[in-house]
Image: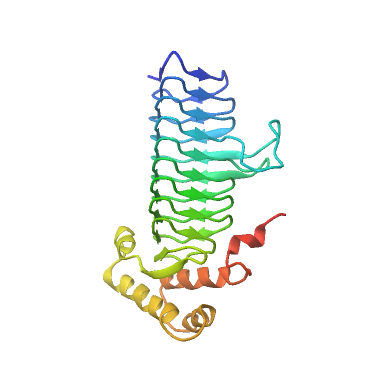
């Protein structure tokens, strides 16, 4: 049975599953759908045209789907959507913005854990099992792949791709793509520090798969030659597994753009 606190304000066309819990002073706008087992604590705001899946938990003062922070947008501008999957935990005072343009969207996958004060900008894609510690700030048009882990106060420039099972150290400022499975820290430029061994374990990779990733890391980052040259040489070797291929592909794609951000190729303006 749906539980709605009497102080909550819910638009008449919002769609709520039978066992959704809506806490005090929540505001839910038109075009919102919320799946079974989802909990909204006090003061959560969900703006129009946001889709929320099942068994999510939004802690107090989260704001989802508000107008993106873009100067050209006005209060009556038509904007895109925000789509949130299942099993996410979004802690206090986190904000997630929708796509800028009608037909565009920000997408949050499944089983992600966003801690206090996290911000995810417009037109981002966050895949599954991502952890963002307190006050992580993600600019617009970023892609965060499965299993990435951000420590506190890390931030990302727009259009950056953070590869699967990476670890981003606290206070890191990302302004270029990060290939999968690696650890990165520092800012302008951030520096690859090594392989994220804990991430490999979380990903369920066996010892042989992990050894291949460590070997690839040494060939890419610990020998003479530019990163792009090393990646090209490694790509010519026989018997590369899918994980090493993913590392090479990420490096190759990011090198196609002058700023080291593959997604910049798709910028509209």
Give the residue displayed 39% in from the left and 70% down from the top. 193
Horizontal side of 169 relative to 103 (left or right) equals: left
Horizontal side of 151 relative to 159 (left or right) equals: left
Q: Nearer the viewer, residue 62 or 130?
A: 62
Horizontal side of 21 relative to 139 (left or right) equals: left
Quadrant (top left/top right/bottom left/bottom right) for the N terminus = top left
Residue 160 coordinates in the image, percent (x, y)? 55, 59
Residue 190 coordinates in the image, percent (x, y)? 47, 65
Give the residue displayed 60% in from the left and 60% down from the top. 263
Q: Nearer the viewer, residue 132 or 111?
A: 132
- Above or below: residue 112 compared with residue 258: above
- Above or below: residue 172 compared with residue 99: below
Which image quarter: residue 243? bottom left
Which colouring convention does the figure follow?
Answer: rainbow
Residue 80 coordinates in the image, percent (x, y)? 63, 39
Residue 73 coordinates in the image, percent (x, y)? 70, 39
Q: Nearer the viewer, residue 245 or 251?
A: 251
Q: Nearer the viewer, residue 168 or 211?
A: 168
Quadrant (top left/top right/bottom left/bottom right) for the C terminus = bottom right
Which image quarter: residue 42? top left
- Above or below: residue 170 compared with residue 89: below
């Amino acid at each position: 049975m749906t539980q709605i606190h009497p102080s909550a304000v819910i638009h008449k066309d919002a769609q709520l599953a039978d066992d959704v819990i809506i806490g005090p002073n929540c505001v839910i706008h038109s075009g919102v759908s919320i799946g079974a087992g989802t909990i909204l604590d006090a003061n959560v705001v969900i703006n129009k045209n946001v889709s929320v899946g099942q068994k999510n938990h939004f802690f107090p003062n989260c704001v989802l789907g508000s107008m993106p922070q873009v100067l050209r947008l006005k209060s009556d501008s038509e904007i895109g959507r925000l789509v949130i999957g299942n099993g996410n935990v979004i802690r206090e005072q986190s904000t997630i913005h929708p796509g800028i343009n009608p037909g565009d969207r920000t997408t949050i996958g499944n089983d992600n854990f966003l801690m206090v004060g996290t911000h995810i900008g417009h037109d981002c894609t966050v895949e599954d099992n991502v952890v963002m510690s307190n006050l992580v700030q993600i600019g617009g048009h970023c892609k965060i792949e499965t299993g990435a882990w951000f420590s506190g106060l890390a931030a990302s420039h727009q259009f950056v791709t953070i590869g699967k099972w990476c670890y981003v150290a606290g206070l890191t400022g990302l302004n270029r793509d990060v290939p999968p499975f690696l650890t990165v820290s520092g800012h302008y430029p951030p520096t690859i520090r090594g392989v994220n061994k804990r991430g490999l374990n979380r990903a369920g990779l066996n010892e042989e798969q992990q050894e291949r990733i460590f070997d690839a890391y040494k060939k890419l980052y610990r020998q003479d030659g530019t990163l792009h040259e090393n990646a090209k040489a490694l790509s010519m070797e026989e018997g590369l597994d899918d994980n090493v291929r993913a590392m090479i592909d990420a490096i190759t794609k990011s090198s196609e753009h002058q700023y080291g951000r593959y997604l910049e190729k798709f910028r509209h303006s």
